[in-house]
Amino acid sequence: MTTITRFAPSPTGTLHIGGVRTALFNYVYAKQNNGLFLIRIEDTDLERSTKEFEKNILDSLDSLGLSPDNEPVHQSERTELYLESAQHIINSGKAYYCNCSKVRLDEMRTSQQKAGQKPQYDGKCRDLNLAKSNDTVLRLKTPNSGEVVVNDLIRGDIVFENSELDDLILLRSDGTPTYHLCNVIDDYEQEVTTVIRGEDHISNTPRQIHIQQALEYPPLEYAHLPLVLGQDKKRLSKRHAATSLDEYQAMGYLNVSIINTLARLGWSRGENEVFNLDELIRDFDIKEVQKAGAIFDLSKLDWINSQHLSQLDEAAFKAELMPFIDNLNLDYSDYDQLDDLIEAMRSVKSNLSLIAEALIPYLDSFKEYDEKGVNKFLVGSEVTLTHVILMLESLDDWNEAIIDEHLAKLQEELELPTPKMNQPIRIALTGSTQSPSLGMTIKLMGKDKSINLLKKALDFLS
């Protein structure tokens, strides 16, 4: 039997990184088993679902290499199929119409809660044989006894008592099918064998198994992933960090870095911390996924992205960085050291957007000095800066080695520790305390510009 997994997003927003993690694990599991990875667009929420969000989701998955093996299906186009299946359940005697009003249901739940009971439908209409009307919903006849065992690849067997599960609504009073019915029928029609999704769906699973049994569908295997959490161990939201895949791509995190980081959200086995999608497919074992919530750590993404950036060859790194440079509208037409500058800046920052911004002092001009750097290093450095200006003015050969040699001699003459020597110069040239090696920084800045910036810093100090 061919292993088939699916990712079933609702197109009511851009692709969330938690959704990316779910899609990734579905994709990897399918490919490990020489199976198929499918996508189902759950677009029955007509008010909130849009084609723009759907395109974002599909394009985002494509950009990560997580493309489906078949064309996506849409729930909004399958209503007739759901109604036919619902009729099959009715004909088999495993469902019934219920006309309980909202008022009665609210009063019933309130009474149950006051009595310390779990709020659930009491089955009042179960044996009344009511006819369909504008006021009835269709409910599934859930078994009153026995249990449902969910065979979970991550959590082992999860047991649910049928007595704790009430009679689920399959069709609303307006005739539209509910999420659970659509979900079960779609999985069957797409020949899904394995459902991999977030642990927030665990409580849905026994209900969907009951529908499968009513329709005489074959059982599925399940894996419920730990939720993606923020540093406070609450579900990841915008108060913790960006949540959309788009945002991380726009910040300049490589797709391979995003995949690498998300794969580690809940799965920590394997010898290598830095890997690509093919290596993940080779090494991943879904049974090794942890049960506890997975904390998303931006600093971890920064580190992983730095590692992947360092592995790019010069041409590939430049190709990745150039769109971010151009997005800043920097004019580099008269700058003849662009390739050297790009390569020198590779490890200065953790993502492409920040690296591109670090090029601004070389290709344009920075707006202000780093305040902490000024107070810690620049203030009181007038003598040092003056000597550096004189030294640079005297140089005929403008290369990194010669600049470093003269800086070292000057540092020895002035009897300065390295931070007191280098950081005032670095702040004067770039506005910050971070740059490539000082000799490289000065070389890339150019002689005239370096001298002018050092003089500007003296003016600032005066």
Image (tube, grey):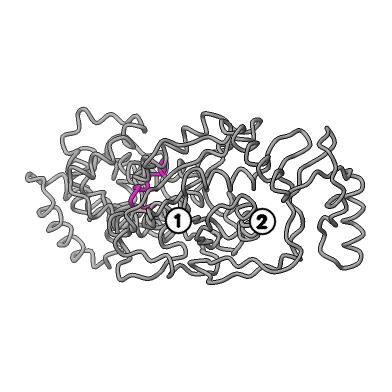
Report if residue 382 is visible in the image. no
Nearer to us in this view, 155 or 461: 155
| Label 2: how many Cα within 10 Å (few below 14, some 14–19, many 20+) | many
Left or right side of 310 for 232: right
User: Does dot 1 land on a helix, a strand or a loop?
Assistant: helix
Residue 333 image point, x, y percent = 21, 27
Res. 200 image quadrant: bottom right
For residue 318, above or below residue 436? above
Residue type at mark 2?
A: Arg
Q: Say left or right for 41 vs 132.
A: left
Verify whether residue 216 appears in magenta.
no
Which residue is pictured at 92% across the width and 52% down the height?
107
Give 267 or 418, whichever is nearer the viewer. Answer: 267
Q: CA distance from mark 2 to mark 1?
A: 59 Å
Provide the residue designation for mark 1. 372
- In which image quadrant can residue 149 be found? bottom right
In the rendered structure, the answer to whether residue 334 lies left or right of residue 257 reads left
Q: Nearer the viewer, residue 137 or 235?
A: 137
| Three-letter residue code for mark 1 | Lys
Looking at the rendered structure, which numbered label has been put on residue 207? 2
Q: Considering the image in quadrants, where does the N terminus appear? A: bottom left
- Identify the disc placed on residue 444: none
Q: Position of residue 352 (x, y in %)?
A: 34, 45
Residue at the spot 36% in from the left edge and 60% down from the top edge: 303
x 64%, y 35%: residue: 45
The label nearer to you, 2 versus 1, is 2
Q: Are marks 2 and 1 in contact (CB under 8 Å)?
A: no
User: Range of the magenta residues?
Assistant: 249-257
Residue found at x 30% / y 46%: 429
Q: Is residue 251 magenta?
A: yes
How far across and how far down the image is residue 384, in percent?
Answer: 27, 56
Residue lying at the far left of the rendered structure: 397
